[in-house]
Image (tube, rainbow, N blue to C red):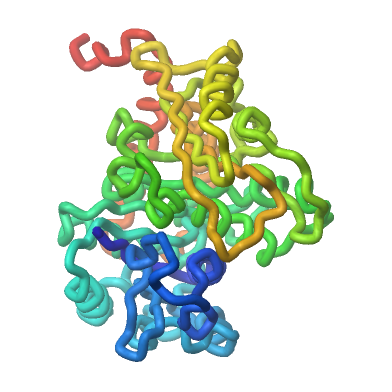
Amino acid sequence: MRKIITLQIGQCGNQIGYEFWKRLAAEHGIEPDGVLTTSEEVLEDRKDIFFYPADDGRYVPRSILIDTEPGVIDRISKSEYSNFYNSENIIIPSSVGGGGAGNVWTHGHECGKENYEALTDVIRREVEIIDSLEGFLFTHSIGGGTGSGLGSFLIEKLHDEYKKATIMSYSVFSRQDSEVVVQPYNSILTLRRLTEFADAVVVLDNDSLSSIAASKLHLKNPGFAEINSLVSLVMAATTATLRFPSYSNNDLISLLAPLIPIPQCHFLMTGYTPISLETSKQVRTSVIDVMTRLLDPKNIMVSSEIQNGMFMSILNIIQGKVDPTEIHRGLRQVRENRSLRFTPWGPASLQLALSRSSPFLESPNRVSGLMLANHTSIRHLFNRIIADFTKIYSKKAYMQNFQIDGIEDEFRDSFTTVKNLIKEYEEAERPDFLNLEDE
């Protein structure tokens, strides 16, 4: 059984990482102190992919928590999960000039360089206790300082050092009305690293997440708690077929390979349904209902007009008690949807994976589903980042914290990388896409 290590970087990364681990522990019957609620023999799961048994019998996350400011990590350390993590895997490196990264990519990146040995020693120690490493999962935001800068540094270093490991990130894209004025600089520099060094990026668009939380949870102003809980649902569902294995998609490679026909275009949209308050009444769900709702733009967690683009691939992960005939009926009905457009140069890749639900969590719904999709309209999100970057960089605004050697080259290379990524997604809609390099 191959294992996965998570790295949660920065304030945002640690907040969503905390919710993710709470969810995983609950799904596997693990108490906040790491103790199993039932005997190991009665379980048919693969918790060892994400947890390891300590000498005292407790289950400990294969997770590394990193932040340049202690606030969020302190709150985790004082929560009911205070003894849940390996304390040796909690790192608060000092940033440039002391303190945090101050929402500046260069400060976070330089912090990574200054603390390279300490950071990689912890990662290497975690890798060495694993018999077979499958990959790394990152949680971070691309708009702040630590998650973007230090996150970029680590993604690049792990790509170089562990060439056979899969690197997958859950990357939060900031709101358009963010108060971080240098967010466009942070975002474009990080997006370059995600393009060049990650194998798959699950895009979590804060604008879309806020809208979904408001409409589905009936909240006027959803806070971080609601949004992070929503992200944890997506992360848990993404890894469900790994932890509760069925007939397919039992490792990261088999999960991601059908979704990414073009290596550079590895940015994935998600949708999840049903989303409801825990206290809401149970409603009837079916595979067809779930698969239809997953294609509804209002359920997709990226602010993008999917009707103006094409799918390269779709994977629906269905959880619950499902009759096989429901699966065939649901697939047939969705494939007959004429508004569902796929890129013309490849097969209409619509796949479905079944996963058992956790025996420890009682779901209010018989069936739930997650969609992972590779869709060309995601380029509009990248276009927005390019536009925001160009607006402030053309005036050399807010550059005082980015005065390091080579920053002009960094910006130029990042701009070119993101523009090429956008072009790749645009050209993927052409029938002659596979022949373009021969022209």
Nearer to the camera, 89 or 114 = 89
Which residue is at a point 42% across and 48% down the rendered structure image?
241
Q: Nearer the viewer, residue 208 or 17?
A: 17
Asked which quadrant contains residue 4, the reply is bottom left
Foreground pick, 428 / 44:
44
- The vertical placement of 156 against 198, above or below, is below
Q: Relative to residue 285, is residue 25 depicted above or below?
A: below
| Position of residue 425 in the picture relative to residue 317 (left or right) | left
Specify the quadrant that holds the N terminus.
bottom left
Residue 22 sits above or below residue 91 on the image: above
* Residue that extends furthest to the front in the rendered view of this protein: 42
Q: Is residue 390 left or right of residue 215?
A: left
Q: Nearer the viewer, residue 35 or 122?
A: 35
Instruction: Give the residue drawn at x 51%, y 42%.
Output: 385
Tell me which residue sits at (59%, 85%) in the image: 79
Estimate the x, y position of residue 98 in percent, counting from the top left: 41, 85
Residue at the image position 47 percent from the left and 29 percent from the top: 375
**Vertical relation: 343 (above or below) 189:** above
Q: Quarter of the image holding residue 353?
A: top left
Q: Is residue 395 visible?
A: no
Q: Position of residue 9 (x, y in %)?
A: 42, 68
